[in-house]
Image (cartoon, rainbow, N blue to C red):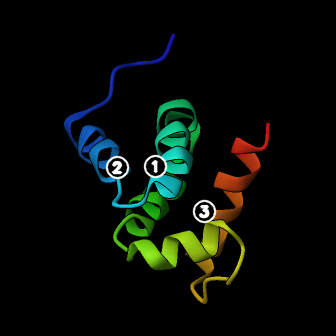
């Protein structure tokens, strides 16, 4: 059984609701199904990732572009890996 989200995690969950439906269908399931399974470093990377602009997030997650930031590269890979299952 998973634990309930903390207040900070609820804030991140809300941030997963973006202006683009394409992002919503990627980020919301990742947060709901996989976030709690990430280690603390990856959770911090995900929080930082969500601070980026929607157009950048979409380009990275659709693999049109690769983020320059190594942390963003890592979290994009994790999101795509987990959602491919």
Q: 54 or 3: nearer the eye?
A: 54
Element class at badge 1 = helix
Q: Could you tell me residue 16's position as x and y percent? A: 38, 50
In 3D space, how far apart are the residues under numbered discs 2 and 3 (Cα atoms)? 17 Å
Residue drawn at point x = 38 percent, y = 59 percent: 47
Mark 1 or mark 3: whose residue is earlier in sequence: 1
| Dot 2 alpha-carbon crowd within 10 angstroms: few under 14, some 14 to 19, many 20 or more | some
| Residue 51 x %, y % | 34, 70
- Alpha carbon of mark 1 to alpha carbon of mark 3: how far? 16 Å
Could you give the CA–CA distance between mark 2 and mark 1, rounded to whole angstroms? 5 Å
Q: In the shown orientation, is residue 24 left or right of residue 39?
A: left
The label on residue 75 is: 3
Task: Pinpoint residue 40: horizontal percent, then vertical percent.
Answer: 48, 50
Q: Earlier in the sequence, mark 2 or mark 3?
A: 2
Is 66 left or right of 54, judged from the image as shown? right
Query: Would you say the residues marked 2 and 1 are in contact, meaning their CB atoms lie under 8 Å apart?
Result: yes
Left or right placement of residue 70 versus residue 16 in this view: right
């Amino acid at each position: 059984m998973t634990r309930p989200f903390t207040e900070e995690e609820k804030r991140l969950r809300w941030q997963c609701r973006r202006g683009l439906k394409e992002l919503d269908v990627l980020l919301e399931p990742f947060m709901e199904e996989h976030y709690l399974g990430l280690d603390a470093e990856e959770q911090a990377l995900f929080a930082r990732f969500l601070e980026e602009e929607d157009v950048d997030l979409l380009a990275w997650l659709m693999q049109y572009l690769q983020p320059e930031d190594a942390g963003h590269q890592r979290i994009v890979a994790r999101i795509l890996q987990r959602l491919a299952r």
